[in-house]
Image (cartoon, helix red, strand yellow):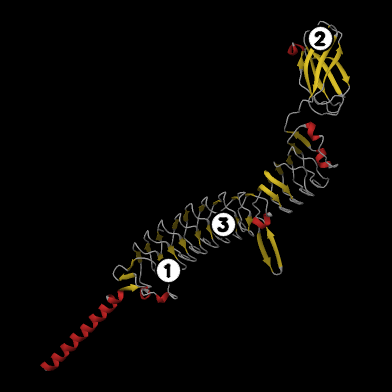
Amino acid sequence: MKKKLKRTVNFITVLILLLLMSVVTIYGADNSGTYGGNISWEFDEYDKTLTLSGNGHMNFQSSVSGYPWYSFQQEVKHLIVEEGITNIPRTAFEDYKNIESVSLPESLLDIEHYAFTRCDKLNKIELPKNLISIGVNAFNSCINLRNIAIPEGVTEISAEAFAECSNLKTVSISNGTETISSSAFANTAITSLELPDSLRTIGSYAFSGCNGMTEITIPNNVETIGDSAFYGCNGVSGIIIPDSVTNIGQQPFGGIANLTSITMPGIKTLEEVCGTTYISGNNTWIELPDSLTAVTITSGEVVKTFARGCKNIRNVTIGKNVSSIGEKAFYDCTGLQNVQIECALTSLSKDMFYNCSSLKSISLPESIETISAGDFEKCNRLKDVYYGSSRYKWRSVNTNGNTVIEKANIHYLKTEPLAYRINSVTQNGNNVTIDITKDYQCDGPLLVATYNNGALVKVILSDINMSIGENKQISVMIDDTDVTDISAFVWDSFDSMIPASNNCRKSDAE
């Protein structure tokens, strides 16, 4: 009996020892090791922390399971990378679903492709200031990541680096970043966006699907905005594209249902910039948002049919740096009401405002010389034309029998130039001599009127054969030699009775 009991005790003892050895194997030696000869790693099973230490570059494994810490993939909650390590290799922590926090060293230079893809519970990470590279899909689908600050050494945010981070609301990008690649922040929860002055390129779909975004500020140095870069950012109401942008992809601001205004260079049509493409069966068409009512074109050669058929646009401003406007630019824009042209156009392109049936007012520059008959055809509500010069200069504008323009009220934004300058008025008995110099070209007859204390005294017609700069004395005979205050005006047109000079009194000359 004793021998049997002894054998049983020995068996239990051996079993316990085997179990202890197993525990040591699982939670001891296999919880740590080396990688690549220069990196040590250790996993603390109790607080679920994986620590990497060492110096230099970590090698890339062709598969996730090739990293020695892979067996703890579903257990790691905290990752600590100690000072000295310079990179996080590709796929090193891809699909580590339970990682909540990551601590990175200042020595880190590169976060490589897919390094933290689909780390579902990762909610906080501080990128070190010396970082220079964020790889493709580096943080893709980290659905609990809420904010990120990109250090200034990162010149390019790679494709899909933060795409599908559905709770990412705050993004700070330091000055130094030049490129935001395709889909880098697509389908995130960014609410506002301030981009650095260093930025040159915004890639295709870079911020598409950011429905919570309410404001977009594009810096003046951006040169390229790719296809659908901000597609579907429905919270945005106003867009300003700077003149520095010379390359605009297809519909970078398409799908924005609440867009009310856009300011842009005239290098693409509105449909190409902010239209939305719809497909039904074999039919494809493009629509602009119904809310878009104001358009400002700041520079460039405004392309042909720039806004053709836009029914809801009410106000258009064509800026000073626009060099030309293509044919039918606003053809059939039936909702258009007000147009302001600030650039130095000499003529309006063919059918530019044809059938803008709601057009009420337009401002034309001083430089305008020709308005074709078809420019305002079917614009029967046009009432007011604000011309950038004087009534005199408007006479030389060729309206080509455009009855809409001819019936409109012309408002002159410059005072009339003085065609004649009255230098002096002198009186000798019944004779009043008016000394006149011609300063400006005018074509009507010369009409001189003299007044005494506001009452008309005499009107005289004189020949108009005066050259610019020529001086003449005109004599007027009056009946009353006792008058003490004689003033004179000069007109150059019987039809309009437009004053051609200032008033000059005898006392002024004296």
Label 2 vs 3, first from the N-terminus: 3
Quarter containing the C terminus:
top right
The Cα atoms of the two marked residues, 3 and 1, are separated by 26 Å
Label 3 vs 1, first from the N-terminus: 1
Q: Nearer the viewer, residue 357 or 488?
A: 488
Quarter containing the N terminus:
bottom left
Q: Nearer the viewer, residue 143 or 472?
A: 472
| Left or right relative to 114: residue 400 | right
Name the secondary structure under disc 1. loop
Name the secondary structure under disc 3. strand
Q: Which residue is mark 2?
A: 427
Q: Identify the image quadrant of residue 29.
A: bottom left
| Left or right relative to 472: residue 25 | left
Q: Position of residue 44 (x, y in %)?
A: 30, 70
> Which numbered tag is attached to residue 89?
1
The Cα atoms of the two marked residues, 2 and 3, are separated by 77 Å
Q: Identify the image quadrant of residue 496.
A: top right
Name the secondary structure under disc 2. strand
Q: Which residue is mark 3?
A: 201
Q: Nearer the viewer, residue 205 or 6?
A: 205
Label 2 vs 1, first from the N-terminus: 1
> Label 3 is placed on what type of residue?
Thr
| Left or right relative to 461: residue 22 | left
Q: Position of residue 374 (x, y in %)?
A: 82, 47
> Label 2 is placed on what type of residue?
Gln
- Tell me which residue sits at (69%, 55%) in the image: 269
> Label 1 is placed on what type of residue?
Pro
